[in-house]
Each structure stands twice: as structure tokens, then as C-alpha cells.
Image (tube, rainbow, N blue to C red):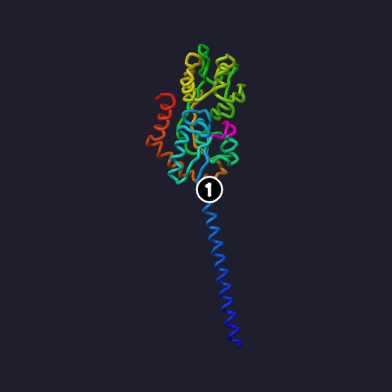
């Protein structure tokens, strides 16, 4: 009788063990599926950029388009990541969202010490000359930054023009802060500003598109020439991909892909080569 009881107890124990193992396996499988689902949701990277910095980046409806977004999409596609390049507001707002991690990637940015606290920078992938735009016939002699002291300047909110020139602006100049390039050009046309600090290609394109060649002009001497970098928020799950991103950027610099993207965008926007 005792032997029968022992056999029954053993069978029950085995059945309980099998049931427990099955429950554990199902739970483990469910957890794996949750991780897999979570990784799928992270496959889409949110990118953004300046809404008015053609041909590298600019707003078109609810998207940021241009050579920068095209390059970012190409690089991350090579890494198996889908990119959604979205308009997220004015440039200062976009930077704040990169700081919080709401935006993963900025398609192009200058390097500053403050930005480096919340974003990792790629290798530079192109250069961006910075110039002065003046009212037609009001061009002035310019050869160095000090020539701007005492003049009425205008810059756009949230923009950097290189760390050294940013510091000079802060310490020596008191420019008006315009919300958009349109506002800055209007100030020039009305004679309420002597110069507008802007990117060369964006300035050329804006003047061409809006037929302002008889109203404003570009000072020939560059203010500075800055590098453009791709940046990844330090709070983004994609920040660990920077070494692979750099390798691909170098590849596309070396084979001329990036230059072709920029030239194609300039041609498409303004017919400028």
C-alpha cells in the first residue's frame, strides 16, 4: 500500500514539475516576444533639423528634407534602421528635443561645447560657408569680425555660426534675433539692419527663389567656414551606432556620394550648380 502511495506521489510531483516548467517556458517566451516587439518599435529613428537651411535641411510640410535627411536615411538604411525625418519646430526647439531624447538624430549641426554635452558628433561630412547679406547698395567694407562692431546686425534664433564667432557675437555685437530668414531679409530691405548672418548656399537660394537680387547682396568675404556633422542624442538608443555611422560617412565622402547629394539638391531647388 505504501509503495502505491509513493508511486502516486512521484507521478503527482512529476506532473506538477512539468506544469511549472511549461508555465515558465510560456512566460519566458512571452518575455522574449516583448523584447522582440520592443526592438521593432526602436527600428524607426526620429531625425530632424533646421527648417530653413537649404540645401542641407529645410521644412517641407511636416517633414525635414534636403541633402542631410537623404544622407541620414541612406546611412541608417545600411544599418537596418528606418528613418522618419520630421519637422519638429524652430531650430532652438529642435535642439531642446534632441537634448531630451525626443529626437534621435540631427541631420546637420555645427559643433559647440554646449551641444556636445547632450549629443555625440559624427565626423564632419561637408562644409558650410557663413556670409553677410546686406541691402543692395549698402554693402560695406568687411575683412574681419571687428568691422561689424557698431553696426546693426540680425541673426536667426537658435542658430550657431561656429563657436568662436558665436562668442564674438555675444561679447562684441548686439544683433536683433529674427524668428525666420524671411523676417531677417525684411529687416534688411527696410533698412532696419545693416547685415544678416546666414549660410552662403541658403542665402543664394533664398535670393534666387524670392527674386531679391535687385534688393539684397552677399558680401564676398566669408565670416567663417564651418563643418556640418550628423549628431545623435546621448539619450537615444541609437547612440551606440556612431562608429558604424562614421565608417559609412567616410565611405560616402570618399566616393563622392555626399557631394552629389548636395549638388542634386541645389539643382532641384534653384537650378544652381
| Magenta run includes residue 88 | yes
**What residue is shown at x 46% (from left), y 32% (from top)?**
66
Residue 267 horizontal/vertical position (percent): 41, 26
Residue 216 horizontal/vertical position (percent): 50, 16
In the rendered image, the vertical position of residue 109 relative to residue 206, given as above or below: below
Kindly tell me whether residue 110 is visible in this rendering.
Answer: no
| Magenta run includes residue 13 | no
Q: Which of these two is toward me, 126 or 10?
A: 10
**What residue is shown at x 49% (from left), y 22% (from top)?**
206
Residue 133 horizontal/vertical position (percent): 52, 19
Q: Residue furthest top?
A: 137
- How many numbered discs? 1
Kindly tell me whether residue 38 is visible in this rendering.
Answer: yes
Magenta-highlighted residues: 87-93
Q: Residue furthest bottom?
A: 1
Q: Which of these two is toward me, 202 or 124?
A: 202
Residue 36 horizontal/vertical position (percent): 51, 54
Q: Residue furthest left?
A: 255
Q: Quadrant of the N terminus?
A: bottom right
Q: Quadrant of the C terminus?
A: top left
Q: Look at the numbered disc 1 and give the secondary structure of its residue.
A: helix
Residue indicated by mark 1: 41
Q: Which of these two is toward me, 230 or 29?
A: 29
**What residue is shown at x 53% (from left), y 48% (from top)?**
41
Tell me the quarter of the picture where residue 192 sits: top right
Amino acid at each position: 500500500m505504501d509503495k502505491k502511495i509513493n508511486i502516486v506521489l512521484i507521478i503527482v510531483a512529476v506532473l506538477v514539475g512539468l506544469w511549472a516548467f511549461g508555465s515558465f517556458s510560456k512566460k519566458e517566451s512571452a518575455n522574449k516576444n516583448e523584447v522582440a516587439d520592443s526592438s521593432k518599435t526602436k527600428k524607426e529613428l526620429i531625425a530632424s533639423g533646421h527648417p530653413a537651411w537649404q540645401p542641407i535641411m529645410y521644412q517641407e510640410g511636416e517633414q525635414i528634407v534636403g541633402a542631410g535627411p537623404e544622407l541620414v536615411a541612406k546611412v541608417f538604411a545600411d544599418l537596418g534602421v528606418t528613418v522618419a525625418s520630421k519637422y519638429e519646430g524652430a531650430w532652438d526647439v529642435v535642439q531642446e528635443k534632441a537634448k531630451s531624447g525626443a529626437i534621435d538624430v540631427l541631420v546637420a549641426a555645427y559643433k559647440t561645447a554646449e551641444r556636445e554635452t547632450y549629443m555625440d558628433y559624427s565626423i564632419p561630412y561637408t562644409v558650410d560657408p557663413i556670409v553677410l547679406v546686406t541691402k543692395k547698395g549698402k554693402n560695406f567694407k568687411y575683412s574681419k569680425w571687428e568691422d561689424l562692431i557698431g553696426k546693426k546686425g540680425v541673426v536667426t534664433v537658435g542658430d550657431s555660426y561656429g563657436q568662436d564667432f558665436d562668442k564674438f557675437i555675444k561679447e562684441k555685437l548686439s544683433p536683433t534675433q529674427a524668428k525666420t530668414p524671411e523676417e531677417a531679409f525684411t529687416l534688411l530691405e527696410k533698412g532696419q539692419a545693416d547685415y544678416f548672418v546666414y549660410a552662403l548656399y541658403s542665402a543664394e537660394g533664398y535670393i534666387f527663389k524670392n527674386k531679391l537680387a535687385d534688393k539684397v547682396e552677399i558680401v564676398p568675404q566669408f565670416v567663417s567656414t564651418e563643418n556640418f556633422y550628423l549628431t545623435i542624442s546621448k539619450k537615444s538608443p541609437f547612440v551606440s551606432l556612431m562608429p558604424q555611422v562614421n565608417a559609412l560617412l567616410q565611405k560616402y565622402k570618399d566616393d563622392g556620394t555626399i557631394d552629389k547629394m548636395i549638388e542634386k539638391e541645389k539643382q532641384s531647388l534653384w537650378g544652381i550648380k
